[in-house]
Image (spheres, helix red, strand yellow):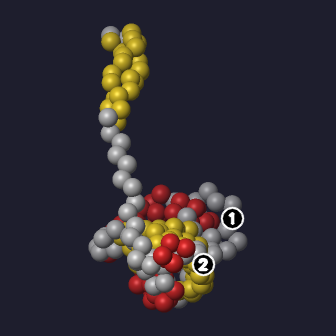
């Protein structure tokens, strides 16, 4: 157990006075346990694999694509005991995120939120309108969620939580196929 003092100012009747309170942090180190059955296993060299997956056009909204991604990389990922999967979406008007994989209401509510936060149409303040009134809002939404994910690989599978899934969020009204470069590395 580690004890530290934390100092801050506390206001009593409008007068700020120093206040010191102990802060207790509990830190526990658990070493990684590995079992080497074959001495050559300890000399395993890192592996790399890369594949570009093209997803068909989706209607506007957030779409659960975990099973589509896994179907495309199942053979490659099976050879990794431990590693990382990096997914990179090669587009600026769609995004990737990890979120709820069970209740589709979460995806609909997320699209509702994005539509309210980022205005569209002729009353929106955007200058970039050459590709349509939904294009600039799509760029902003893409930046909000991002275009890449990094997911741990454990025993040949993506190591996500029980209720987590990969979403492709399509921010355009007239979508195009979306390319995702998937890079696997590990042992």
Judged left or right of residue 125, residue 40 is left
Label 2 or label 1, whichever comes before in sequence order:
2
Identity of the residue drawn at 35% across and 28% down: 3
Disc 1: CA contacts within 10 A as few (<14), some (14-19) or many (>=20): few
Q: Is residue 179 visible?
A: no
The residue where tag 1 is placed is: 128
Q: Residue 100: which quarter of the image?
A: bottom left
The residue where tag 2 is placed is: 48
Q: Measure the C-alpha gap from mark 2 to mark 1.
A: 39 Å
Q: Residue 116: which quarter of the image?
A: bottom left
Q: Nearer the viewer, residue 57 or 5?
A: 5
Q: Measured from the top left, where is residue 109 in percent x and y?
A: 36, 66
Q: Measured from the top left, where is residue 15 in percent x and y?
A: 39, 9
Judged left or right of residue 12, residue 93 is right
Q: Is residue 146 above or below residue 65?
A: above
Q: Is residue 30 above or below residue 9?
A: below
Q: Measured from the top left, where is residue 85 in percent x and y?
A: 52, 73
Q: Secondary structure at mark 1?
A: loop
Q: Residue 139: which quarter of the image?
A: bottom right
Dot 2 and dot 1 residues touching (CB under 8 Å)? no
Q: Nearer the viewer, residue 98 or 177?
A: 98
Q: Which mark is residue 77?
A: none
Q: Nearer the viewer, residue 124 or 109?
A: 109
Q: Measured from the top left, where is residue 12 in percent x and y?
A: 33, 12
Q: Residue furthest front?
A: 39
Identity of the residue drawn at 34% across and 68% down: 161
Disc 2: CA contacts within 10 A as few (<14), some (14-19) or many (>=20): some
Front label number (2 vs 1): 2
């Amino acid at each position: 157990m580690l004890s530290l003092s934390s100092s801050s100012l506390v206001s009593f009747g409008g007068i700020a006075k120093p206040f010191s309170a102990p802060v207790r942090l509990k830190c526990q180190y658990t070493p990684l346990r590995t079992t080497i059955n074959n001495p050559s296993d300890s000399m395993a060299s890192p592996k790399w694999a890369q594949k570009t997956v093209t997803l068909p056009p989706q209607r506007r909204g957030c779409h659960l694509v975990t099973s589509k991604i896994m179907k495309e990389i199942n053979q490659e990922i099976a050879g990794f005991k431990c590693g990382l999967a990096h997914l990179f979406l090669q587009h600026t008007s769609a995004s990737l995120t990890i979120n709820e994989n069970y209740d589709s209401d979460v995806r609909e509510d997320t699209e509702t939120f994005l539509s309210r936060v980022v205005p569209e149409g002729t009353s929106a303040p955007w200058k970039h309108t050459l590709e349509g009134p939904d294009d600039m809002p799509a760029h902003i939404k893409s930046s909000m969620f991002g275009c890449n994910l990094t997911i741990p690989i454990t025993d040949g599978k993506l190591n996500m939580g029980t209720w987590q899934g990969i979403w492709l969020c399509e921010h355009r009204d007239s979508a195009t196929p979306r390319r995702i470069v998937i890079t696997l590395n590990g042992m």
